[in-house]
Image: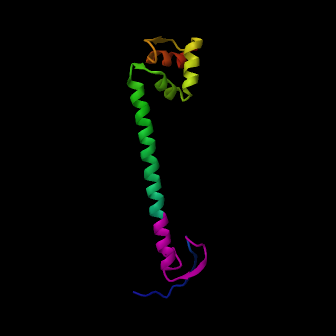
Amino acid sequence: MSSNIEVQRICQYCEKEFTARTTVTKHCSDKCSKAAYKARKRNEKIKQSNAETTRTKTKHIEKLKTKEFLNVREVAQLLNCSIRSAYYFIESGTISAVNLGQRMTRVKRSEIDKLFNKT
């Protein structure tokens, strides 16, 4: 089926002006069409990978939120601070913790919740 229509369009990939023979033509050539397809597929893969990474990060944080007792590293991850800052909060009394021996400091999950419920 041929058409006698000639429409001036701008290529969505290379942004050059061209004469299209149909009203749905988006690209000036087969080369631009293939390049746009590859770029679109590449962006879809990147978007999917970023979503998977975000899902993995939040899954880890959600797992920490369910634990009743946390070590200092997990406290730092929940508070989004350094481990040294978490120790500072414990030493200053902002967060109460129990020391069960060398390298065995534990914090109750409710202590972290209390930090954010102060009025």
The answer to whether residue 24 is magenta is: yes
Who is closer to the viewer here, 37 or 83?
A: 83
Residue at 41% over, 27% down = 64
Q: Position of residue 29 (x, y in %)?
A: 51, 80
**On the rendered structure, is 35 left or right of 63?**
right
Residue at 46% over, 68% down = 37
Q: Which residues are magenta?
A: 13-39
Q: Position of residue 53 (x, y in %)?
A: 44, 44
The answer to whether residue 70 is magenta is: no
Residue at 48% over, 59% down = 43
Image quarter hosting the N terminus: bottom left
Q: Position of residue 88 (x, y in %)?
A: 59, 18
Q: Is residue 35 above or below residue 68?
A: below
Rendering quarter of residue 11: bottom right
Q: Position of residue 68 (x, y in %)?
A: 39, 19
Who is closer to the viewer here, 84 or 101?
A: 101
Who is closer to the viewer here, 90 or 43?
A: 90
Rendering quarter of residue 91: top right
- The answer to whether one can see residue 94 in this image is no
Image quarter hosting the C terminus: top right
Q: Is residue 65 above or below residue 40?
A: above
Q: Is residue 34 above or below residue 105?
A: below
